Amino acid sequence: MKTDFLVIGSGIAGLTYAIKMAERFPDQEVLVVTKTIADETNTKYAQGGIAAVWDELEDNFNKHIDDTLVAGDGLCDPHVVDIVVREGPDRVREIIEWGARFDRDADGDYALGMEGGHSASRILHYKDLTGSEMERALISMIRTKSNIRVISHCFVVDLITQHHAGYLVTKSTPDITCYGVYVLNLHTGKMEQIRARAVMLATGGNGQVYRTTTNPPIATGDGVAMVYRAKGRIENMEFIQFHPTALYQPGHKGHAFLITEAVRGDGGILRNNLGEAFMEKYDPRKDLAPRDIVARAIDNEMKRNGTECVWLDCTHMDREKFLHHFPSIHEKCLSLGIDPLQDLIPVAPAAHYSCGGIKTDESGQSSIHRLFAAGECASTGLHGANRLASNSLLEAMVFAHRCFLAVSERFGEKETEPGSLTFPEWDAAGTTAPKEMILITQSLKELQALMTDYVGIVRSDTRLERASRRLDLLHEETERLYEQTIVSPQLCELRNMITVSFLVVKSAQFRKESRGLHYNTDHPAKSGLVQNIVL
Ligand code: FAD
Ligand code: SIN
């Protein structure tokens, strides 16, 4: 299969880019592939909203820049922060023009929410369903473009790349070129090649490597693993953000339901089993301290008191306002017999967001020629060691736009077609259908257990060393299985999650300090050496 512009992923980053490319090149094709159905993405589950400087009387760019830098704990790229904060409001206006709705106050102005680490109210939101509303608007927009083709149930397995021996490796002239991807077409069960002039990776996050996560099952880090296999650069993978308040539901199967930070923004208070509002012991910003601080405080309270959760107290909040702002949280809690305005909501931290990923420059170009990345799979330099709440939808849109500008300029014209190279068909010789799915499902459980127990909110040298040794074994067994077995999404995802876990552990081992989201009890202080870990 051949197309002009290939997009992998149908979340906010992939669809924003696709719409812009399709509008700019109406005579060319934009092909979006996605591994399940189009709207099954992390984007759909975003609750709190999107951060942007909107009310220029109460807020300004410098405040948003400072908040992002403070949360990032010394590792943000200040130039990238400046870009995202200043370009953000224009991208928000664009998605409003495309039909996304955000809540308004009684005067008809956009209602701006408050979240942890922000010094002003700047979170545009649609109830507690912001992501679902944005995804809806993007999908409706896609449907109006006759030159966008979306193929669902199309699993991208690997990049098709050529390595040019002898090239000088610099930022602007990568020595690897991407020509397309190998996909498993789940409609036909066949492996196919898709070739394109430029490939955009928008494959999202990797929360599924942990036992408890807010991320849906698609979040298995496929894009990062593919780029690493192709020898592209991956950055800062140790910075996994745990959201402090996922709904605690013992025995629940599937991803954890989020209780948005906006609930604390509207006055919700965290309490331990003794009823103490414990956050004041940890940070003067109390319940609205940045996420790393709140998640570690909760972890500490749970360990100290021997409980599996803490509680979010909303009983003092106004019922009308709560119902208006958080209808889905209200409904979910009621379905479990919890009335959030009368009862405390049990919550515990859950893996939520990957701050690191595929290293890109300011245009979204990865270290591989003709390969771009945006959204959660990318490491642009915005988040540093810890992402500020509600900055990721913003980053995804700003960088999707920047990828659009760069791809249009560099590869927009048909003449920029790479040479007509041929690449080998997928070699499935000697492989057979999987005989025992337990070999995959049990390895996945082991992986999630070791990442949760040894590479969670608090780490130590010994735990990381243990994780590394156990990962080696899982890697060896899974690679053997992969060589012998017909490709399936389950096996590919396991393989990708092992690679991602390896990258998290290795980066964590290299970082001999505690900074942002990475806390190691053997190196509790921040080092004077401020560096990104690139693998
Ligand atoms: P996604 O939206 O995750 O899309 C990834 C796409 O890639 C999917 O279509 C998937 O099918 C596809 N894909 C992946 N691998 C393959 C493959 N191998 N082959 C083919 N397709 C593939 N951020 C905020 O800024 N504000 C919030 O309020 C907020 N709330 C959140 C709440 C929850 C519960 C969660 C989970 C996240 C939240 N986030 C929030 C984070 C934010 O939603 C995500 O970071 C963002 O939506 C990621 O968008 P994306 O386009 O990069 O990826
Ligand atoms: C939330 O609504 O609490 C999540 C916001 C985010 O992840 O940015």
Image (cartoon, rainbow, N blue to C red):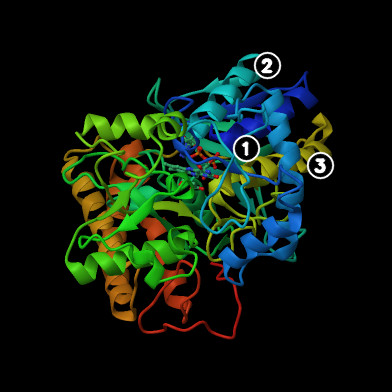
Confirm or deny contact between disc 3 and disc 1 (CB under 8 A). Answer: no
Nearer-the-camera pick, 404 or 328: 328
Residue in the image at 55% along x and 38% along y: 181
Would you say the beta carbon of the disc 2 residue lies within 8 angstroms of ligand 1? Answer: no
At which x and y percent is residue 166? 71, 65
Question: In this rendering, is residue 474 above or below 249?
Answer: below
Q: Earlier in the sequence, mark 2 or mark 1?
A: 2
The residue carrying mark 2 is: 145
Front disc: 3 or 2: 2
Question: For residue 11, what is the image quadrant?
Answer: top right
Q: Secondary structure at mark 1?
A: loop
Picture disc at residue 422: 1
Question: In the drawing, what numbered circle is on residue 410?
Answer: 3
In the rendered view, tell whether residue 350 sits above or below residue 303: above
Crowding at label 1, few (<14), some or many (≥20) Cα neighbours within 10 Å?
A: few
Q: Residue at x 66, y 29 (%)?
A: 18
In the image: residue 238, left or right of residue 453: right
